[in-house]
Amino acid sequence: MTVEKDFIGDLPLIKNVNLKYLKMKFVHYLEKITDVSVYPVISFCIFGLFFIAVATWVFKSDKKQMESNSRLPLD
Amino acid sequence: MQLEKFYYDNKIVRAFAYATVLWGVVGMIAGLWVAIQFYAPGTALNYPGTTFGRLRPIHTNAVIFAFVGNCMFTGVYYSLQRLCKARMFSDKLSWLHFWGWQSIIVLAAATLFFGITTGKEYAELEWPIDILITLIWVVFGINMFGTIIKRRESHIYVAIWFYIATWVTVAMLHIVNSIEIPVNLLKSYSWYAGVQDALVQWWYGHNAVAFFLTTPILGLMYYFLPKAANRPVYSYRLSIIHFWALIFIYIWAGPHHLLYTALPDWAQSLGVVFSVMLIAPSWGGMLNGLFTLRGAWDKVREEPVLKFFVVAVTCYGMSTFEGPMLSLKNVNAIAHFSDWIIGHVHIGGLGWNGFMAFGMLYYLVPKMFNTPLYSKKLATNHFWLGTIGIVLYAIPMYWAGFTQSLMWKQFTEDGTLQYPFLETVTQIIPMYITRSIGGTLYLAGALFMVYNLYKTVKQGSFIANEEAEAAPLVKAHSHVKEYWHRVIERRPMQMLVLSLILVLIGGLVELVPTFLVKSNIPTIASVKPYTPLELQGRDIYIREGCYTCHSQMIRPFRYEVARYGEYSKAGEFVYDHPFQWGSKRTGPDLAREGGKNPDGWHFLHMFDPRQTSDKSIMPRYPWLYQDDLDISTTPAKIRAMQTLGVPYEKGYDQIANTDLLTQAKRIADGLKADSKVRQLMTVEGIGNPESKEIIALIAYLQRIGKDIKAEPKSTTAQASLK
């Protein structure tokens, strides 16, 4: 394909640019990911579950152990 | 069990502490200098290295990576040894880390001064320095993990978790964002283009704030605040939730830097949701810090160290409330590109980072030199100077931000814009002056600290190797089933892997779809690659740091379209390695600059902006009229672009300069026909401009945003709707 005469087209050599190739070379694009919004939803669920797991552990954990851990900088 | 005697290495801590002070002062002076240039453009000295576009990256890099970086290492090397009850893993690695990091800083300052830059904010350093950063970061990692592994304390204290997350995430961010194709030793192009580059960059940029300026300093807070207050942290439980929630959520928030831009809408919304959620862990951490002082507020009155910590943590709370608010699209529409953002980041920078560093130094230096602080009164004066400095810095910036934003969008009754852009700049000059007064006070306070610490060092005697005793760690053989988290707490590698997985989830979900889905970047047939001369001009644009004041992104608002032209489309940037959307409009947006003004206007304007725009605060660029354009790099640049997928035909690299010279001659001939240009050339003794850099820059400026104008209207609308 040849560039039509326009603001860059009057340069003698750049006319040969192939404009069909408009994508980045290193990625093979998928045309579409079905329901892309499911990705953040899944991650949100992962975060939710992880958060609940940490919170459960934290509140079930031994108080004495927590206190001794918190004193580490002072010892 | 027999206690083992060992020695903490204070020498390395001292070295990093001195480096923190030195680079802090250097970074602040650079900051003050660029602040003064806003109302006194002459202070750019008409010299390339001291012009705003180059000095501003020097300021940001010095403050972030040199000042806060060295502060982080000071605190980590001090606290890690004590929390692990072990000397650092290897003294050799410690010193390799120290000198390696200082060399990076010196190389960074030198290259940025000479305009050697990638043009990506906070990631400006060129590829050889990027590699060096990676290597030194690995050295730091080995030393840190080696120390954790040989520790004599079974539990890994929460501060160390923050250090681990910092290390792994910064490594990931730096590597992903720095992937670039070298053209030569001092020049490279970002691997990504346009929208993708913007997303990767702000994913990096935002998380540099998160994992370089926040998590390591939170680690320091969890160590030094209890130490200074002599009481344990308010809630250790809360600190655990704070840690996991913060690192998981932070990584998602990057797209809030790109609201209303050409980034796909779903990615913008995702960024907003996670940014709002970020309030919870951030405030959890802040309250945990402040509540640590419960019942000890009387100490705050006496102790300058605690004064600094209290204001630091309060500033952290302020900016982490403000950040999510700024992420709301309606607030962002007002604040983005304005000085409000500058105010916001300086609450974090001056308040949180600066005051944490000062507090830590006032605590550490007397301890290591086995002497009380030389003068508490001087430190208190420093505290007040700094606090007033922050207030005088931030309030004018908020004021300026609102003023700008309201003026930008003000229409007359006839439906035309009321204020020319320049008027929105001159209106806020008093705010810029007040801001620099605030900065001066802050710097003066820091100089008080230099003197105070110097006198403390002089009066004390340094404990190079501090003696300590602890029992060796016995491998735990518990017969009781342990909670999974308890197991992780003892295993640094598992902690590292889990942290990495958490931050990877956020990163991958955000980045991968944008890279994979073609429909995210609707291509526009009329958008063509840059001509060789424009490409060279673009590199000059990047070299001079034009992006530090000019955006190239018109948001889809009536007032922006009326002022600048049609709003920007994702497909317009497919050849932009790197993207140049910018983040601040000290000057007007340039996304549709092409064809707006004649070549002659640009020629006069770049030589002295006051000639064409009275009261403009833009610096002069006289060297572009003296220096010849280096066209020897053209073939390599074209080849690099070909590698990145820009469709120049095979072999074009060898003949590109012919096109370049043709275009340069045409522009120069046009200029010579302009009487005002001829007059300037005669008066200033400028020779034939054909071979000069200014011609390439004009070629680029005249190209920006022009392609889409060649597109039939219906197709453009369709592309934007996709």
Image (cartoon, coloured by chain):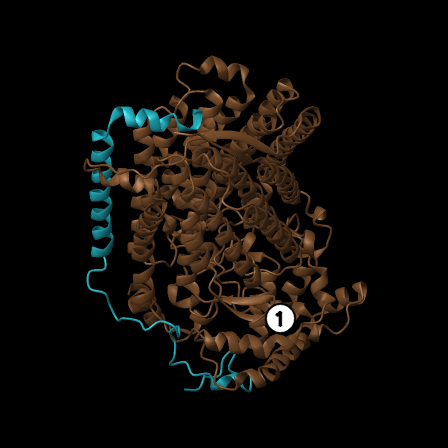
Chain colours: A cyan, B brown
Name, please, the residue furthest toward the front.
B2
User: Is B564 rendered above or below residue B669?
Assistant: above
Q: Nearer the viewer, residue B151 or B598?
A: B151
The residue under label 1 is B696
Which chain letter goes with mark 1?
Answer: B
Question: At 38% from the left edge and 79% from the top edge, which residue is drawn?
Answer: A21
For the question of whether residue B412 can be seen, the reply is no
Q: Give the x, y percent position of residue B137.
A: 50, 52
Q: Give the x, y percent position of residue B533.
A: 59, 74
Q: Amino acid at mark 1?
A: Ala
Q: At numbered mark 1, what does the secondary structure look like: helix, strand or loop?
A: helix
* Quarter placement of the C terminus of chain B: bottom left
For the question of whether residue B297 can be seen, the reply is yes
Residue B653 appears left or right of B688: left
* Quarter placement of the N terminus of chain B: top left
Q: How many marks?
A: 1
Q: Nearer the viewer, residue B39 or B211?
A: B211
Quadrant hosting residue B566: bottom left
Q: Give the x, y percent position of residue B29.
A: 66, 40
Question: At 34% from the left edge and 37% from the top edge, which residue is drawn?
Answer: B474
Q: Give the x, y percent position of residue B269.
A: 30, 50
Mark 1, other Cα within 10 Å: few <14 / some 14–19 / many ≥20: many
Q: Nearer the viewer, residue A71 or B469?
A: B469
Residue B376 appears left or right of B226: right
User: Is B422 rendered above or below residue B32?
Assistant: below
